[in-house]
Image (cartoon, rainbow, N blue to C red):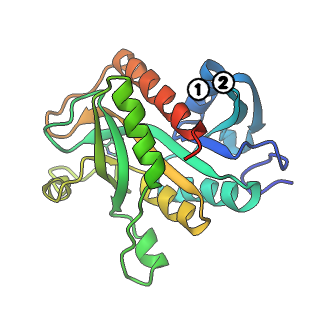
Amino acid sequence: MATPHIEAETGDIAPLVLMSGDPLRAKYIAETYLEKPKVFNEVRNMLGYTGIWKGERVSVMGSGMGIPSISIYVEELCRFYGVQRIMRVGTCGAIQEHLALKDLVIAVSACTDSAVNSARFFGASYAPTADFPMAVRAAELAKQRGMNFHAGTVVSTDIFYAHEGDLSWKVWADYGALCLEMETAGLYTIAAKHKVRALTVLTVSDSLVSKQAASSKERERSYTGMMETALDTIIKKC
Ligand code: HPA
């Protein structure tokens, strides 16, 4: 069985799926954290692997960048492969002063400037929301690990390179949003449609407030904490 974008056979993909924007990051996660990783997708180089974490079958796959890309993969994972839980692991740009580089963000909900959901919901606005037990579990695990974490709303933007001088992110910040990223509103919406539980956890890679950016070494180290938290969250029955 194959879908337009995934060539896996039924059963090749675990019911628990981690997604990173970068497919090479998915390969790295599979090869670093999972026992016996086996590739299940190479279509468009959107690599996907299934392996074992603490005795549980877990898959990890790239999502690509932006809501349209992740929405296609999440729809196919939910509709054709019987996936039960999906977690996005990624990076974000802080828009609040109290978020430091390398902090963890647990995305409780996702605002968006994308037209996708206003088209889907006849001009009305939908509130893409995380699975609550998974969000609580991720917070508990982050606390146990002594990580600096924040739980709240994020902004899934369609625009990475804003027009020069565009400070519209400050409006989101005034209403309490924590950071910018590009996929979570799509993940939460499509997962909800299929009654699939979903959560995004993010590492702060840069700050629009302080204009700092984490070095690749710093990002690597904070990524390890996020990855282990994500894997422990997704295998926990809750
Ligand atoms: N904007 C959107 N996505 C991001 C950013 C950003 O500033 N930083 C990391 N992911």
The percent coordinates of residue 208 (x first, y second) are 19, 40
Placement of 134 over or under 116, stated as above or below: above
For the residues bearing labels 1 and 2, Cβ distance under 8 angstroms: yes
Q: Report the amino acid beneath label 2.
A: Leu
Placement of 179 over or under 36, stated as above or below: below
Is residue 212 shown left or right of residue 25? left
- Residue at figure coordinates x 61%, y 19% from the top left: 32
Question: Of the residues under marks 1 and 2, which one precedes in the sequence?
Answer: 1
The percent coordinates of residue 235 (x first, y second) are 60, 37
Which of these two is toward me, 6 or 162?
6
The percent coordinates of residue 17 (x first, y second) are 63, 43
The percent coordinates of residue 29 (x first, y second) are 58, 26
In the picture, the disc for residue 29 is 1
In the picture, the disc for residue 34 is 2
Q: CA distance from mark 1 to mark 2?
A: 7 Å
Regarding ligand 1, which quadrant of the image does it lie in?
top left
Q: Is residue 145 visible?
A: yes
- Residue at figure coordinates x 57%, y 48% from the top left: 86
Placement of 54 over or under 158, stated as above or below: above
The local secondary structure at tag 2 comes to loop
